[in-house]
Amino acid sequence: MNFWNNPVQFISQWLTGVFAGWGMADWVASLLIQLIGVVVLASMMMVIDIFLVWVERKVVARFQDRLGPNRVGPFGLIQPFADIIKLLIKEDITPDGADRVVYNLAPIMSLMSVLLLWAIVPLAPVIFGVDLNVGALYIIAAGAIGTLSIIMAAWASNNKYALIGAFRQVAVLVSFEVPMIATLLIPTILARSMGMNDIVQAQDVWYILVVPLAAIIFMITAIAELGRTPFDLNEAESEIVAGFHIEYTGMKFGLFYAGELLHAFTFGGFWAILFLGGYRLFGLENLGPLVAAVILFAKALFGYWIIMWIKYTLLRIRIDHMLAFNWKFLTPLAFVLLMVVALMNAILPHNNMLVYVAGMLLSNILLGWIVIEILRVHSRRERERVEGKNQMIEVAHR
Amino acid sequence: MTLPQIFFLITAFVILGSALMVVTTRNLIHAALWLIVTLFGVAVLYALLNAGFLAVVQVVVYIGAIAILFIFAVMLTRKEMRDRGPQLNRGWWLSGVIAALTFGGLFWLLQAWSGFSKTAADFPSGFDAVGQLGNALVSPQAFVLPFEVASVLLLAALVGAVYVAFNRK
């Protein structure tokens, strides 16, 4: 067994040997090694999180034609640490009438719900927390804990703005979960498994080329799940100040902020795993697990960049428009797409890869075209309705 | 005592303790949060039993939907979050006796069962539990009829909810 071929197993076997040398029982050793694995993975993600603060600030600066942090360290790389020190030495305020235990538990749960997701991320064919056979559903389950943390934060802060923010966020999360589940089922149908590793292994052709519509819908629902612009009604600054984390100061706010950044990066990663082939890149992943992990992180950063691109380009949309967009457009579309993909999967021959991919792609493009036509007819009718009314008003004024 | 047994005992104590807190705490939101701890404990039990699919669905459905609905219902309908008044009624001892009898009866029944003290064998490697479950749900030899009946029931409930909430212009 070589370190470069399978680093996780190599280290765990070495640790087992060390612990056995200390006279530790077998099950204690395996429990301890698993705990170490959890701690290492969680700490690694939180260290990457520090780096993400810098990435986010630099990218938003470029989008807004600014320079971004550039004073502390080379390219402002030390800036996140200055931010952390600032957050740590801020006064920690607990509002009057706050529910103390719930108030302090909420930021921890918020970050935890994101870290939980990394348990099922396959960084390489042999580097993963668990290869869960219900991985796709696990993403939704971890999201449920995130929703819960938002309600807990808002309710425990004893603040009306916070509560309004949480109500909005839960409305978004609960409704956008539906198309998200439907689109998660599409890679499941194609790969015949819900496990993340199996889905990556099955992507000889990246699924974004097979089912581009599903990739787009998943990206939209992921942004809604993150509560980022254009779906950031939960913290709409101009209306409800900061939403659910309004009463949090110092590092408790920092945990929400870190959770949000890592969540965006994580969904970039899941988008890459489900539709961009995960750690696979033209056979480069065979060079070794560490190369594969680097490929996955690069793809996750690309997904994260798209999320940032959308966030810093679009405006916030109104809540009724957002709910109508979800229930009247995205949900039916996701279900129709699911049915189309299931049907095509049954019809198309599996042994001929070219015909299979081309058939899937054509059916996706056809469906997308039909949807755009329907939207065009609908919007023309709507425009005529509004313009007709305006003409009537003009006539009345004359 | 093996590791799964220790995990089971911890989980069982957490479930029972939090279930007790659900009915004894006077703060209604706290009761809902303790209920979430209980439901999560049940999910852990499913995971300990190698039923990963059920564990995840338990979290998605009960914590992600039902518990959040509870919290909303409490927040939107109650002005006062504290529950006043007596927590026990006159029949409390009767329900205690019935609970003890049920537990004793089940224990006595299960003790006679051969699988009572056996440890569950692990799945053979490559065993696709989720795939088997999915096949069983749509196979005519297994559960397709109950599955479809449940689907129709849920659809009827959905249509009913839309009908009740529909705003006639």
Image (cartoon, helix red, strand yellow):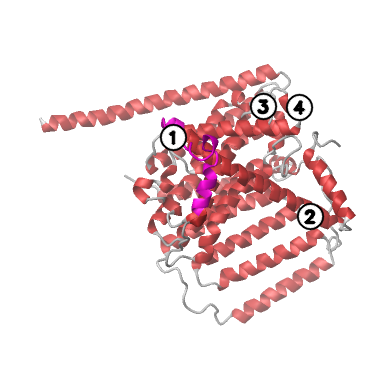
Q: Which mark is residue B69?
A: none
Task: Specify the subunit that label 1 lies on.
Answer: A
**What residue sits right under mark 1 in the picture?**
A312
In the image, residue A89 sits, relative to residue A210, either above or below, namely: below
Left or right: residue B165 compared with residue A392: right
Q: Residue furthest left?
A: A398
Q: Earlier in the sequence, mark 3 or mark 4?
A: 4
Can residue A151 be seen in the rendering of this structure?
no
- Residue at (41% x, 45% y) in the render: A233
Q: Are marks 1 and 2 on the same chain?
A: yes
Q: Which mark is residue A31?
A: 2
- Residue at (56% x, 82% y) in the render: B90
- Amino acid type, residue under disc 4 in the picture: Asn
**What residue sits right under mark 4 in the picture?**
A286
Left or right: residue B45 compared with residue B80: right
Task: Specify the subunit that label 2 lies on.
Answer: A
Spatial CA distance of label 2 from label 3 is: 44 Å
Task: Specify the subunit that label 4 lies on.
Answer: A
- Residue at (83% x, 61% y) in the render: B2
- Amino acid type, residue under disc 3 in the picture: Ala
Spatial CA distance of label 3 from label 4 is: 32 Å
Q: Earlier in the sequence, mark 1 or mark 2?
A: 2
- Amino acid type, residue under disc 2 in the picture: Leu
In the image, residue A329 sits, relative to residue A151, either above or below, namely: above
